[in-house]
Image: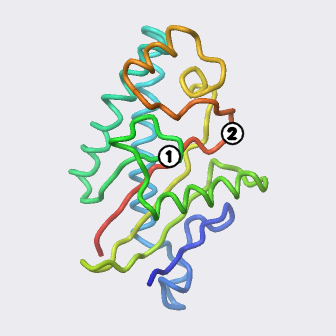
Amino acid sequence: MSRIIPLTAAATMLAVATLATASEVDAPDPNLVEARSIVQEFATTLTGELKEAVQQGGPVNAIKVCQERAPAIAADLSERTGWTVGRTSLKTRNLDRNSPDDWEAGVLADFDKRQAAGEDVKPMAHAEVIETADGSVFRFMKAIPTADLCLACHGSDLTDDVAAALDERYPGDLARGYQAGQVRGAFSLTKPL
């Protein structure tokens, strides 16, 4: 059994009645607020480090940041917040670390459908309370839009040095061929309730 919190551009911060009583509907769900804050910190930190890496050594330098710093940032956030924090995609680059579970794959497929139907990827998110054998968990995913910064390593026209560096670091890499504005993947957070 699960309870879904629909998150549209017009109501991204509101809890719906399935998670709130009538008197609570006007107040944002605290788990949703916290999850969004964690995603914002993750995205801001990673983007800043990627931009700095590109400025210092080009896109090849940024590959190392994604491979090493992104998991470290996620681990730090997980430890500090009590959430399990990560990133995933239907077209993973690091199969061992970022392959989606069934729930994540379903949400990512829905994100792709929503984007194909014309919805803006930037505010796209999904939250749901899932009942597991160990109890209820709050799950949250926030779509990662493919930005211009991403295209040097995730686009269709990779330079030879970038392609070689990706091939060396990520055997089986599937995370290429994106266009700006597409769903690149998602931040994925889980918290026991």
Indicate the position of residue 108 as horizontal and vertical percent values: 56, 55
**Image height check: is 57 above or below 74?**
above
Q: Residue at x 45, y 49 (%)?
A: 187
Alpha-carbon distance for marks 1 and 2? 15 Å
Q: Quadrant of the N terminus?
A: bottom left
Q: Mark 1 and 2 residues: CB-CB less than 8 Å, in contact? A: no
Residue located 34% across and 42% down the image:
97
Is 107 on the left-hand or right-hand side of 8?
left
Task: Write down the residue under mark 2.
Answer: 181
Q: Looking at the image, which is closer to me, 83 or 24?
A: 83
In this view, which residue lies farthest toward the front? Answer: 172
Q: Nearer the viewer, residue 33 or 95?
A: 95
In the image, farthest residue toward the right: 118
Q: Amino acid at mark 1?
A: Ser
Placement of 188 over or under 66, stated as above or below: below
Residue position for label 1: 89
The type of residue carrying mark 2 is Gly
Residue 84 locus on image (x, y percent): 30, 56
The residue sitting at 55% across, 44% down in the picture is 144
Foreground label between 1 and 2? 1
Counting every numbered tag in the picture gives 2
Q: Secondary structure at mark 1?
A: loop
Q: Residues within 10 Å of mark 1 (few under 14, many from 20)?
A: many
